Every structure is written in structure tokens, then in C-alpha cells.
Image (cartoon, rainbow, N blue to C red):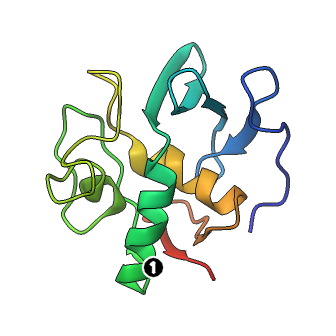
Amino acid sequence: MIDHVEGNGTAEDPWILTTPPGSSEFDAWHDEERDALAIRVGSTTLSYQWRSIADLHAMLVEHGDWMPLGNADEQKPAKPGTVEAWARSEDNPVGGWYGLRKGYRGRFGTYVPPVLEHLGLAELEHLPRNNRMRATG
């Protein structure tokens, strides 16, 4: 479980989270206007459908075991069987990408899992590489 999270998840006071390896911080919040999960990394903002949190949790519950996160930019293929691959698959609940900004729809496996961990919906590994996650509860 993560040791420390700042903020309350709004644009004015975002959660300050770290990537699974703990190597980088990023801000995350619920963009209520767009009903999106907004992620700010440096000067770049990515956004994913807000429902991706509940959908990912439901998929992990059904999966029932640890699942590799995977991590890839939109322009690169995602490794099959990973959270990243699921987030772009035509077989997921939205029939494709959860990312909302063309060109920045990847990296789901990097930024969304720490949000689920913070919300108590998932357990996440924090190794230097090849991290996995599973549903809690």
C-alpha cells in the first residue's frame, strides 16, 4: 500500500501520486466537467474516461489474480495480457481506448493503477520493473 498521498482529488487540490516503481510523481483528479480522470505529468495532461476506474476494478475482480500492468505509449503496441492491453482492447466495456486525448491515450498501466490503489480498490506492486496489480475486497 502507498505510504503517503496528498490532495483530495479535485483540480484545485489533486492527489499527488507516484508511478508504480515510485520513480515519478504525478497529479490526478476527477475532472467533473469532462467526467474524466485527469493526469498531469510535468507540463503534459492526459485524461481517461472516469468509468475506467470502475471498469478496471471489475475486470480485475473477474480476473481473480495478479495481472501485469504493461506500459506503452499510444504509438507502441501493448504486451498482450496486461492492464495496458485491456485498456485499448475492443473487448473492454467501451470497445477500445479509455484515453481521451489522441496521441496521449497510452500509459494507462502507469497512471491509472495508482489511483485504484489510493481508492482501496487494488493492490499494486512497487518493484523497479514489471509490476502487477490485483483487485482488493
Taking depth in this image into account, of 70 and 99 the one nearest to the observer is 99
Q: Is residue 120 visible?
A: yes
The residue at the point 39 percent across, 41 percent down is: 107
User: Mark 1 falls on what kind of element?
Assistant: helix
The residue at the point 50 percent across, 76 percent down is: 134
Location of residue 116 by image quarter: bottom right
Q: Is residue 70 above or below residue 122?
A: above
Quadrant that contains the N terminus: bottom right
- Indicate the position of residue 94 as horizontal and vertical percent values: 26, 48
Other-residue count near label 1 (Cα within 10 Å), few / some / many at <14 / 14–19 / ≥20: some
- Asked whether, in this view, residue 117 is left or right of residue 90, the answer is right
Q: Is residue 115 above or below residue 60?
A: above
- Indicate the position of residue 58 as horizontal and vertical percent values: 44, 70
The residue at the point 55 percent across, 60 percent down is: 128
Give the residue type that dot 1 points to.
Val
Q: Is residue 21 visible?
A: no
On the image, numbered disc 1 is attached to which residue? 61
- Asked whether, in this view, residue 51 is left or right of residue 16, the answer is left
Location of residue 85 by image quarter: bottom left
Taking depth in this image into account, of 115 and 35 the one nearest to the observer is 35
Taking depth in this image into account, of 22 and 34 the one nearest to the observer is 34
The residue at the point 30 percent across, 35 percent down is: 73
- Indicate the position of residue 17 as horizontal and vertical percent values: 70, 43
Outermost residue on the bottom side: it is: 64
- Indicate the position of residue 18 as horizontal and vertical percent values: 67, 45
Quadrant that contains the C terminus: bottom right
- Asked whether, in this view, residue 90 is left or right of residue 45, the answer is left
